[in-house]
Amino acid sequence: MTTFADTERPLDDAREIDAGSYRVTVAAGLRHQFARLIAEAAPAHHYAVVSDVAVAPHYGESLTLTLAAHAPVSLHLVPSGEAHKTRDTWARVTDGMLDAGCGRDTTVVALGGGVVGDLAGFVAATFMRGVPVVQCPTTLLAMIDASVGGKTGVDTAAGKNLVGAFHPPAAVLADVETIRTLPLAQRRSGLVEAIKHGVLADAAYFARLDADLPALLDAEPSATLDAVARSVEIKAEVVRADEREHGRRKTLNLGHTIGHALEHVSEYALLHGEAVAIGMVLEARIAERLGVAEAGTAQRIEAVLRRAGLPVARPRELPVDRVVDATRLDKKARGGRVEYALPARIGAMAGEASGWALPVDDQLVHEVLA
């Protein structure tokens, strides 16, 4: 178990990002200050810490012990993995909170990766018609993407994140040192969302990520801190401009329409980042075929992803027809047509005049997948 210090450890290079109604704090060693920062951001009569069985042995017991100095604490464990981000798990956590005596003066604390953050956020959004949540992401993917923006939800048999709510956190607290406990595949997966942010908003950041790949894959704290902070800045800026995803926020879905379909058809054997990596390359190819992206955009994205050790093509065992069918289940589909967030070039997205999302015929998606 990785313990939390009884006294706070000085932070050498903490970054604070304004995300609108809340702040995101990123630092190496921030976990040593979690209890105080949680209590300051969301005072409560009871803290319900939601974590999974992989993360809790590292940080769960220590966080509950330090939080107990502020209010009673209960720890609610869920199985690891996307397959358990379901309404059944949501029900078990909410029932467990009721059994623990949680009321409207409870704060939920999400301690874990993106699955825990989405699930715990949805629990907070619906428990007693809404209680505060503090996000404490422990994976690179969750720090860069899932914990920021206020989207919460669970998956259904029909598709991913089809039941959920917008419920912004009271705070996001990210300690980049926790990434050291992740397997290399998880680090690679997390980098995809950072690369996506470079593609959609910042060509210089895209180039810096490419140059820093060895350090990022080694979870070197300085490079990781810089990447997490810049990605959070990009996402927070987009979300502040369009919190409910009526316009510009749709650009954050780059790679996700095909990516979510690949996840679904693979029954989540593909990691989220792996599926989105493939989705980004294929959706950039679609953009080039439609004439909305500069030639070579897909090739540049593919080259960086390959250097990061990520997949860039549809796994042969996933049938093209099933993947295309799964894209129609996407929550962004409108009028029977699936809308895609497509790049114009590295650092900019297409489709501003049409609301930042473009309908794409299934035949073209089929051709690119094949």
Image (cartoon, rainbow, N blue to C red):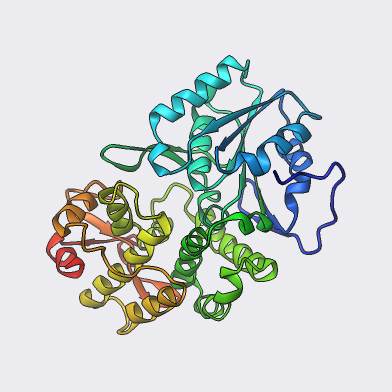
Q: Is residue 170 visible?
A: no
47 versus 6 height, above or below: above
* The furthest residue to the front: 1
Q: State the residue in front, 52 or 358.
A: 52
Task: Out of 367 and 220, give the one closest to the viewer.
Answer: 220
Whether residue 69 is visible, yes or no, is: yes
Query: Based on the displayed image, in which of its 4 quarters is residue 248 positioned?
Result: bottom left
Going 33% across and 77% down the picture, which residue do you hit? 298
- Tag count: 0
Q: Residue furthest right?
A: 7
Q: Where's residue 79, x and y in %?
A: 48, 36
In the depicted structure, whether residue 186 falls above or below residue 329: below
The percent coordinates of residue 26 (x first, y second) are 68, 57
Residue 128 in the figure: left or right of residue 85: right
The residue under the point 76% across, 32% down is 65
**Residue 1 rendering spot, x and y as whole percentages:** 70, 43
Q: Residue at x 20, y 66 (%)?
A: 369
Location of residue 221 (image quadrant): bottom right
Residue 15 relative to residue 134: left or right: right
Q: Is residue 35 left or right of residue 325?
A: right
Q: Eyeballing the image, is 172 above or below 365?
A: above
Foreground residue among 360 and 270: 270
Considering the image in quadrants, where does the C terminus appear?
bottom left
Q: Position of residue 279 (x, y in %)?
A: 32, 63
